Amino acid sequence: MPRGTNSQGNTYNSPAVSQPNTNSYHYSNTDGSYYYQNSNGSTYYNNGQGSATYTAPNGTRYAK
């Protein structure tokens, strides 16, 4: 399972721990935000300050 820290200091994990054996991954960023790319093509981004955006596989975006 590839994981580590990129040049910006952000940690990544592929595949995401919650979805082993898939092409999913997630980033945990130094600013407290995090990003998930799911195996079904959906994405989830949380800015670490209470706002989040989910993008469904069909491209529809939902913001919190």
Image: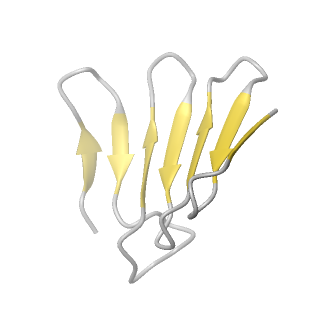
Residue 30 percent coordinates (x, y): 44, 20
Q: Judge left or right: residue 20 versus residue 32.
A: left
Q: Is residue 52 above or below residue 23?
A: above
Q: Residue furthest bottom?
A: 21
Quarter holding the N terminus? bottom left
Residue at point 74%, 24% (across, down)? 51
Q: Is residue 24 above or below residue 37?
A: below
Quarter of the figure with residue 48: top right
Q: How many marks?
A: 0
> Between residues 60 and 29, which one lies in front from this camera angle?
60
Quarter of the figure with residue 15: bottom left
Q: Is residue 59 above or below residue 34?
A: below
Residue 60 percent coordinates (x, y): 65, 51
Q: Is residue 30 above or below residue 10?
A: above
Residue at point 42%, 42% (across, down)? 27
> Between residues 43 and 57, which one lies in front from this camera angle?
57
Q: Residue furthest left?
A: 7
Q: Judge left or right: residue 48 versus residue 37.
A: right
Quarter of the figure with residue 53: top right
> Between residues 33 and 2, which one lies in front from this camera angle?
33
Residue 20 percent coordinates (x, y): 45, 78
Residue at point 71%, 32% (across, down)? 52
Residue 12 percent coordinates (x, y): 35, 45
Quarter holding the C terminus? top right
